[in-house]
Image: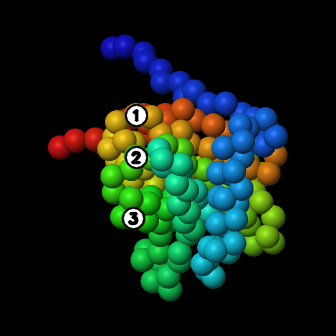
Amino acid sequence: MTDRQITIPYIAAAYEELAAADRELVDKAREATHRSYAPYSHFYVGAAIRLDDGTVVTGSNQENVAFPSGTCAERTACYYAHSAHPDTAFNTIAIAARQSDGSEIAVPVAPCGACRQALLEYELLAGHDVRVILVGSKEVYILPSVRALLPFAFTEF
Ligand code: THU
């Protein structure tokens, strides 16, 4: 029997400390929350993906009266990005969220398990790490890769 540990590397930073390109991506994720369709949860999520060529693609959560038919912001963004730009790798994704009173959540929003799995597929396709920026009103977390968010990932069968 062996005791093992996995540690998750990430940087906690203030928005003002981010590089200009990352600040821009955070701004776009925040803007995308305003295009969320969330009449059921009233939780408005936005995602912005920068591709390796600099293109930025955004998405937001899109809910449905048949609840499972809705989808998260991260998957809207990554499916849209890869269907519009199938030959260009993802570089960085930023995710932001607002609550029913319109205020941004304080603790950086963390993608659900299904979105982590979906994003990992595009990291593998990219052939390099895809940085993940989780946005909160007080601080921002920067993860070096999607893999860091999903250590025991399902990657082949
Ligand atoms: N949601 C996202 O879009 N991304 C996340 O990371 C967490 C949850 C959405 C799904 C649903 O529309 C609403 O937020 C409440 O769960």
The N terminus sits in image quarter? top left
Calculate the distance from the C-alpha at mark 3 to the C-alpha at mark 2.
12 Å
Calculate the distance from the C-alpha at mark 1 to the C-alpha at mark 2.
9 Å
Q: Nearer the viewer, residue 134 or 23?
A: 23
The amino acid on which the numbered mark 1 sits, given as a three-letter code, is His
Q: Nearer the viewer, residue 54 or 155?
A: 54
Residue that carries the numbered disc 2 in the rendered image:
89
Residue that carries the numbered disc 1 in the rendered image:
128
Are discs 1 and 2 less than 8 Å apart at CB?
A: yes
The amino acid on which the numbered mark 3 sits, given as a three-letter code, is Ala
Residue that carries the numbered disc 3 in the rendered image:
84
Neighbour class for label 2 at 10 Å: few (<14), some, many (≥20)? Answer: many
> Which residue is rendered at x = 62% and y = 44% of the image?
133
Q: Nearer the viewer, residue 138 or 30?
A: 30
Q: Is residue 60 visible?
A: yes
The C terminus sits in image quarter? top left
Q: Position of residue 40 (x, y in %)?
A: 61, 80
Q: Position of residue 27 (x, y in %)?
A: 71, 56
Across the whole image, how many numbered discs are drawn on residues?
3
Q: Secondary structure at mark 1?
A: loop
